[in-house]
Amino acid sequence: MPALVSHPDEVKVVSRRFGMGATDIDKYVELDGYKAVQQAIAKGPEWIITEMKASGLRGRGGAGFPTGMKWSFVPKQSEKPKYVLVNGDESEPGTCKDHVLFLHDPHAVIEGTMIAGLAIGSKLGFIYLRGEYRYLLKIVEKAVADAYAKGFLGKNIFGTGVDFDIITQTGAGAYEVGEESALMESLEGKRGVPRIKPPFPAVVGLYGGPTVINNAETIANAPHILLMGGEAYAKLGSERNGGTRLFGISGHVERPGVYELPMGYNLKRAIYEVAGGIKDGKTLKAVVPGGSSCPVMLPEEIDIGLDFDQMGKAGTMLGSGGIVVLDETVSIVEFALRTIAFYQHESCGWCIPCREGTDWIKKTLTRVYNGGGNKKDVANVQYLAENMLGRTFCPLGDAAAMPTIAFVKKFRKEFEDYIEGNKAGTPIITVEQLVGAH
Amino acid sequence: MSTVANTIFSPETAARFDKLVTIYPLKRSALVPMLLYAQDEIGYISDAVVTEIAQRIDLLELDVHNVLSYYSMLRTKPAGKYNVQVCTNISCMLRGGYEILDHCKHKLGIGHKETTKDGVFSLEEVECIGACCWAPAIQINYDFHDDLTPDKVDVLFQMYRDGQGKDVK
Amino acid sequence: MPDVKFTVDGKQLTAPAGTLLLEACKTAGIEIPAFCYYPGLSLQAACRMCVVRIEKMPKLQTACTTPVAEGMVVTSESPEIAQARKATLQLLLGNHPLDCPVCDAGGECELQDMTFKYGAADSFYAEPKNHREEQKWSPVVYFDRPRCILCYRCVRMCGEGMDVFALGIQNRGSSSVIAPNVPAQMSPDDLAHVDCEQCGMCIDACPVGALTSGTYRYKTRPWEMNHVSTICTHCGDGCKTTLGVRSTSDGSEIVRGDNRDKSGINNDFLCNKGRYAFDFANNEDRITQPLVRQPSGEMKPVSWEVAFDHVGKKFRELRDTRGGKSIGVIGSNRTTNEEAYLLQKFARTVLGTNNIDHHRTADYATFAHSLAGMTDRAASLKDTLTAPAIMILGGDPTIQAPATAWNIRTNVRNNRARLYIANASEIKLRRQAKAFAHIAPFSYGALASFIAGDDSAVDSLTHPGADAASFHNFRNAVRAEEQLLVLIGSDIRGGDLKRLLAFGTTMPNRKFALLSDYVNSRGAADMGLLPDLLPGHTTLAGNTTFAEYNAPSEPGLDMLEIFEAAGRGDLSALYVVGSNPVSRYGVDPSSLKNTFLVVQDMFLTETAALADVILPAANLYEKSGSVTNSYGDLQLVSKAGDRAGVRTDFEMIVRIADKMGANMRELIPFGKGPRGAGTHGDMGQSRGAHSGEADQHAVWLAANNMEPKLSPFDPFAILDEIQRLVPGYNLLRLQLLSGNDQHLQPAVSTANLVQISNRRDLVLPANDTLFTSGTLGRYSTMLSDLQHNESLRPPTGLTQIQTAAD
Ligand SMILES: Cc1cc2nc3c(=O)[nH]c(=O)nc-3n(C[C@H](O)[C@H](O)[C@H](O)COP(=O)(O)O)c2cc1C
Ligand code: SF4
Ligand code: SF4
Ligand code: SF4
Ligand code: SF4
Ligand code: FES
Ligand code: FES
């Protein structure tokens, strides 16, 4: 069972009930659970959307799209049923925040799903968890069943005449299925290949109906926002980045864990104070700030506020909030290889630049890693990555290209030295291991 | 209801499948979960599983193959009773994931996607399993084990061997 | 849709709103490269070759998925775009075998063309390429995985286009692969196979050489062939097929069939027969010398001269001694219109008999008489692609008329056409049908009556599983359609067909077509290969149209009566041209023992085996002329193959007539000067009634600005006469000659519209499968292989395919 951590700098909103037994529906209700949704029923969709917009909540899945605005895009009238889809596919390396959320507060996700449903006029929500999260699925399934038993879900919820149903769903191992349209394909029993956009899900989504899709954490914020008021929530964070966020700090830190910090919180402080600094007193070499797809940052770049805009300006991304810390022992060549190997393995294969590009970058870096590199390889890797960027069918191609470009650009010398035989850091992967999974 | 006459599944699983195909706006939505649950019971996606699931959802077998071959958790060959999945992705790698993988290989005497002779364990190197903050992490079947060291792995293996391991499905 | 204005490369363009940018550019002559896009199939945006720059968009956009919008400003070529395309090609080539010199697609490969254009050949990847063995998925479909660029055209072609869904995409990422529906582990030989209709459309769509066809593989290169567009000899749809021809020591051999320029009536489509089943022409069993039965009973090769002499002499003698009425003539539904016309004219005017028939696969006489004098009632094959609503009564187009089925599927898929089907079997097209009326077996007569308004007929249609109400609902839905195309299977004929059409033609905006089985089944009937009807379904009695013929006025014997007469010993001679009635009608061989039997055929068929003289014939791919498909669409056939030792049926008929001493210029209007005074003026054939009259043919030619044909062997001389005389064949010469199809309205000579009644209903549907084609098909190795291939798999039921959120 993952250990819970805490730090005085934390501002607990979504993580408020963590460790308090809120998987139990009565406990959840005692801790203000299912209040927000009843308010939402009473006050109606306009109110919900106004509050959500005021909260400045931006999607916690990675792209940071304003949630209230997303909900407002769903057409009021629709021939086809509308749906709410909760993205709990959490597979971006370095990210495990939804894991803790499902583990400790599944009802918040359920309540948030209902609120989203009310906001857009949907009667059916889906909570999709990655296949590996079976024990969490069981927790969520139980929570859903308890909510049905109490009359919180199903027909005539809370005796208000409103109907709402939730179906829980499992994936079966595919990072790409986290991409919203690929997730819909998967939920329709197909290969997890993304769809052509436009039309966007808000107009044509699941089963062809207008669909709101949000990350689990985004959704779990909704009840809190309605209870505390959108503006109050917004104030917790930084400009245009309302509220707080679950940051998972992993890698070479003393106290890795999932911490809830205000948006805009200083990255350096998060690493050195909140997570206890670099493990075993070593020196920091680099930070991958928001899951493996975010361009790497150098130690001198990390005195920066953790929000979508500031990180974007710095040429990287806030991403999924998974901060991976690398100390001086890390070989960037190896780290870059392990990163691209992941994307190569997870590319759905639909489009040429990503399918072939990830494959060739991985092949080239593997050869370099094994000592067979030559000078042109560094430029080739960059060429390949730059020619993927912005040219692929879905953002996975970018997610593979961006970190690769950053590694090569920011550590070019290390790559060149490596090829010359001067290896920085302490490479771990053995040649046999390379032929393993990837 | 597409109840199947000569099902290859246990009565519980068959009943579950009977229900599953009815809850979605489109029957086909049951496909991915059904495949995974079928694998939990049978051990892998056999041809018979493909045939019955295709029948239950009114799909062509080809469709079922297309889908199942996409998802990395689904396998078409049997695995061990306990499938040990070692994450070597970045966060785990930084905290000894490869060491754990190596240790498992030596301890079990098998490599990636191989099964021990007695059929108790199989081993697989996997991508991030969403336990990065508690790295290095592994899953044995669906159970997470985190913050591992080689010694802790030994204890775990013994536990499973002794039938003491959890086996959530 | 209203037009929108937009700019591409500085050019102002307009296109209907909703048009895809790629299509709009193509129309304007701006070619945008595309691998995954295929017109009419679902959009993929997968290959990223079609990227263009659209103002105000942050990234390059795919032209294949972007609809044009008002004011859109597009750049279709720029250094940035060229670089994007080049990089994509480099990525593809990194793993591509580059075996172009031996690849079947070499010279016709879109990847090769693109690589050349964008200069991407300088592959800089040092990694070894993935190598995998080529796989044989079926006798016609071969797959070479490393060449596959994963454009998914084949998958969509098979699924969306063919509604077969035999190809899928498996695995993911760089392991993604196109997979057939019979996986290796489920196959007796442990190899993957494709269990499908074997149409080859996937191969046709493949932009590279990853899918190749069994017949053509490694045989030759595209530039070493001559390409001749002609018409497929198999079913009644009459697709244009382009035959690749290569010279050999004894003629020219057809090595490939395909749909190269897609300019035919069939657009993109060809089925396996049109594509592969040309190989009967190369069959070693072909007869290449005339054979004459000796008194000993043995067949002996003789010279053409001897053979024609013999036949001419015998025919003349038997006609003169036992009378024309003792001679029978059986024509073909695979010869040209000119040959069919000439044959019946020869029979009627030279042999002096109306004992003429052919293997009828649909009742065109009733069809023509029912629609006589009406316009816009007879449908063209093209209507199946555009009609907003279609009803199919009987028949199974998927098998019997694959191009029709293809069009209907396309129409339903892309235009949301509504399809209504009434059939005693659950035919495959019912998957596309909005309504399906499952009628009781053998109740097509009742179906025709019921559709025509006879409520009492509904009882005969019902059976457990379909009640009367369902048929009423079906009929109500069909009647509510404002425009309807009605396709009629050959099960409905005679009085039933008449009743159906009589009712149907009272409703506005109804068009009809009658499905038949072979390339010129319709033409054979239209050309008068019938005992009771002259060309154009003109009745014998009171006929003035063919007054210049001198045909016997009494109807002759039909197919069955001819053999009955033979059995009685009343048939002195039988002349069979391109037909195998002995097998088709189960004729007792001994019944022909007292008949002088002349057979023109390619092979020693059951009928030819009984012949006294066998004349080796050319097939449709070895001659020129015209054919008429089931719908009445007239098309040109052109000579592609050539085989030493065979002659066209046309030539043989002419030679025999000549040997009989017929007036050749009366039989064939060739040469200058008055007809009837030609070389054989002494043959007693001059027609009193006509001598002295102006030569009508010459007058007509002059009026139509045409020159007389100079040779009696020129089929176009007969085409001139067909055009002049046959009601309904008022064709446009230029259309025909430029290889375009033209739709003819059936017109019975309305001058004397005699109602025909009590005709004997002799329609015998051919019942071919996708892998048979009458007697001819037995000599196609490819079709035999496919039948064998098919026999290895258990038949599967019709699967209902669930379509996504629709
Ligand atoms: C390759 C890829 C993987 C993704 N994986 C996830 C995921 O695991 N969980 C998630 O919430 N969003 C994921 N996303 C983002 C989703 O597409 C989508 O933006 C998100 O679910 C929207 O929710 P939000 O607005 O609440 O963030 C992924 C996107 C891409 C391109
Ligand atoms: S970028 Fe292309 S290949 Fe990669 S995951 Fe997206 S659609 Fe698939
Ligand atoms: S030959 Fe035709 S039916 Fe067979 S796989 Fe190809 S497209 Fe499908
Ligand atoms: S086989 Fe040909 S058509 Fe099919 S995906 Fe590959 S390249 Fe495209
Ligand atoms: S549909 Fe008919 S005409 Fe067309 S290719 Fe096939 S058999 Fe020939
Ligand atoms: S990297 Fe191992 S669990 Fe995420
Ligand atoms: S043609 Fe547009 S992406 Fe392939």
Image (cartoon, rainbow, N blue to C red):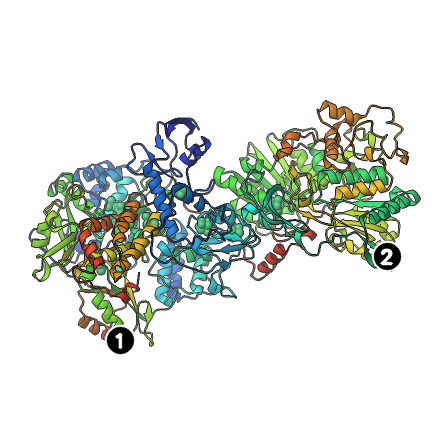
Residue A154 at least partly seen: no
Amino acid carrying mark 1 in the image: Arg
Mark identifier at residue C294:
2
* Residue C531 found in image quarter: top right
Residue C394 located left or right of residue C524: left
- The answer to whether tags 2 and 1 share a subunit is no
Q: Which residue is mark 1?
A: B161
Q: Nearer the viewer, mark 2 or mark 1?
A: 2
Amino acid carrying mark 2 in the image: Gln
Pinpoint residue B153: horizontal percent, then vertical percent.
Answer: 21, 71
Q: Residue at x 32, y 40 (%)?
A: A200
Residue B109 position (above or below residue C609): below
Report the chain holding disc 1. B
* Residue C381 found in image quarter: top right
In the image, C413 versus C261, the foreground residue is C261
Pinpoint residue A190: horizontal percent, then vertical percent.
Answer: 39, 52
Mark 2 Cβ and ligand 5 under 8 Å apart: no
Residue C120 located left or right of residue C374: left
